[in-house]
Image: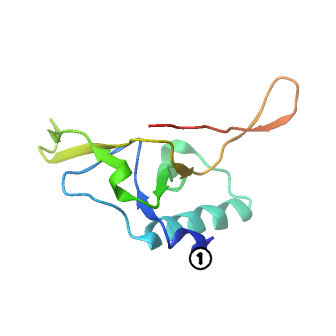
């Protein structure tokens, strides 16, 4: 996975980022995904309220950073810092922690999301 992802720009999306944010270092996602994977393989049962940092691994990947635009900066009412939100101008590749659910038919399903600009 590392050899493929190191060639791409990594951009946090679907969340606010600091006003001066451009992109994330490639190791940011890989280190966090490894922590998530290790916990998952250990049999750990995730609780979103406690483990949100392991579950919120949404990252957009692109070969052209110009495809990612940012909205106007805004000031948080509580911490008074400036933030912005990223948006891609065309469909992009995303990776996130996955969700598995068991529905009323007692079958295991995975959740898949498709995003486009």
Secondary structure under badge 1? helix
Q: How many marks?
A: 1
Residue density around tag 1, few if under 14, some if 14–19, many if 20 or more, within 10 Å: few
Along the line of sight, the residue nearer the viewer: 102 or 19: 19
Figure coloring? rainbow
Q: Is residue 103 left or right of residue 48?
A: right
Could you say where residue 97 lies in the image, as x and y percent from the top left?
60, 51
* Residue at 54% across, 50% down: 94
Q: Please, which residue is most extreme toward the bottom here? A: 3
In this rendering, the answer to whether 3 lies above or below 81 is: below
Q: Residue at x 54, y 43 (%)?
A: 48
Q: Judge from the rendering whether residue 91 lies leftward or rightward of residue 19; answer left or right.
A: right
Q: Is the N terminus in the top left, top right, bottom left or bottom right quadrant? A: bottom right
Q: Residue at x 66, y 43 (%)?
A: 99
- Name the residue located 53 percent from the left edge and 38 percent from the top edge: 115
**As rendered, which of 89 and 102 lies closer to the eye?**
89
Residue 74: name its quadrant.
top left
Residue under numbered circle 1: 3
- The picture places residue 102, in percent across and down from the top left corner, at 79, 33
Residue 3: % across, % down: 59, 76
Quadrant placement of the C terminus: top left
């Amino acid at each position: 996975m590392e050899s493929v992802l190191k060639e791409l720009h990594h951009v946090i999306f679907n969340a606010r980022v600091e006003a001066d944010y451009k992109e994330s270092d490639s190791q940011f996602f890989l280190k966090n995904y490894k922590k998530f994977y290790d916990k998952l393989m250990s049999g750990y049962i995730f609780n979103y309220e406690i483990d949100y940092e392991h579950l919120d691994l949404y990252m957009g990947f692109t070969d052209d950073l110009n495809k990612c635009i940012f909205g106007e900066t805004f000031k948080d009412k509580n911490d008074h810092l400036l933030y912005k939100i990223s948006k891609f101008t065309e469909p992009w590749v995303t990776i996130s922690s996955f969700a598995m659910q068991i529905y009323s038919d007692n079958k295991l399903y995975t959740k898949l999301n498709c995003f486009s600009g």
